[in-house]
Every structure is written in C-alpha cells, then in structure tokens.
Amino acid sequence: MPKKIITEMLEGVGEFVKDSAKQAAETIDPIKIIDQAAGVNRREDELTKYLKDLGGNLTAEELEKKKKEFEEKAAREKKEAEKVIKAAIPAHLRPTVDREPSIFDRNKQEEEIKKADELQAQKKQQMESVAVPSGQQKGILAGKRRKPVSSDFERQKNVKIG
C-alpha cells in the first residue's frame, strides 16, 4: 500500500516536471539558447533593430551614420526643450547662481561656529572634571557635616519646659 502511494506521487512529480519543461521550452527562444551555448554575443539595441526594420538592407556604416544622426537630433531637441522650460519658469522659482555670502551672513556664520566650539569645549571640560561624591570630600572646601534633622527634633522634644 505505501509503495503504491509513493509511486503515484513520483508519477505526479514526473508529469509536473514534463509540463513545466514544455512551458519553459515554449517561452525561451531556442536561437538565444544556441547563441549562449556557442558563446556568440549578439547584442542589438532597439534603435538598430528599428532602423533595420525601416531601411531594409542597410550596411553597418549606414546604420552607425543614422544612429549618430538620431542621437544628435535627440540632443538638439533636448536643448530646445530645456530652453522652453527655463523660459516658462517664473523668476522666483529659477535656480539661483551660487555667489559668495554677504559680510553679514559671513559674520553670522562665524559667530555660530564660535558658539558651537565654545559649547563643545564646555562639554569636554565637564566630562573631564568628574565631581567627587559629597561623602568623600575632604579639606577646607568640603564644608562641615551637619547632624541629621531627626536628632534635632528628638532633642527639642525631650527638653523640660518651665
């Protein structure tokens, strides 16, 4: 019984592989496969293909000549389109020409740089001078220790009045 199930599964897989191989063979161009196996590199761009379809029997030199003409024509049309677009853009939306900042702007930038440098120096100095915990301070600047407030409260509570 399990042998029968396994054989049916293998037959199903075999049929699936055959069908997918047929579909792949139909979609792949056999000429391209042969060229790839032989190492032949046929690269035709769309323009060359288009010119061949238009011109019929053209030599390689004529194809190159027409290709150059087409590229020059496209470049001219692009320049003309850019001119038209630039003319249509209002003055306030046109890109400005890079020029040196005014004296006021330069001074403002210098002040900002100085402030940033000062802040960096302060941060660096704070990082270098680590504060000693108050319980470990010694010397004149350490200050006197005070007794806890709770003991003062108890002392006042036990005082006799009168």
Image: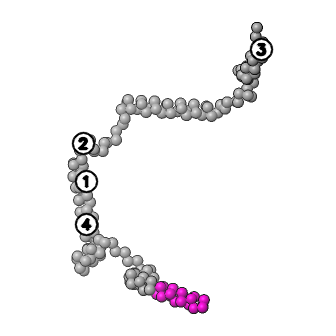
For the residues carrying marks 4 and 3, which lies nearer the camera in this image? 3
Q: Earlier in the sequence, mark 4 or mark 3?
A: 4
Q: Is residue 13 magenta?
A: yes
Residues at badges 1 and 2 in contact (C-beta under 8 Å)? no
Which secondary structure lies at badge 1? helix
Residue named by callout 3: 159
Residue named by callout 1: 82
Above-or-below relation of 12 to 113:
below
Q: Is residue 157 magenta?
A: no
Which secondary structure lies at badge 4? helix
Residues at badges 4 and 3 in contact (C-beta under 8 Å)? no
Q: Which mark is on residue 70? A: 4
Q: Amino acid at mark 2?
A: Ala
Disc 4 residue crowd, few under 14, some 14–19, many 20+, Cα 10 Å: few
Disc 2 residue crowd, few under 14, some 14–19, many 20+, Cα 10 Å: few
Q: Is residue 88 visible?
A: yes
Q: Is residue 6 left or right of residue 130?
A: left
Residue named by callout 2: 91
How far across and how far down the image is residue 157, in percent?
75, 18
Q: Picture quarter containing residue 60?
A: bottom left
Q: Amino acid at mark 4?
A: Phe
Above-or-below relation of 87 to 139:
below
Bounds of the magenta segment = 1-18
Q: Earlier in the sequence, mark 2 or mark 4?
A: 4
For the residues carrying marks 1 and 3, which lies nearer the camera in this image? 3
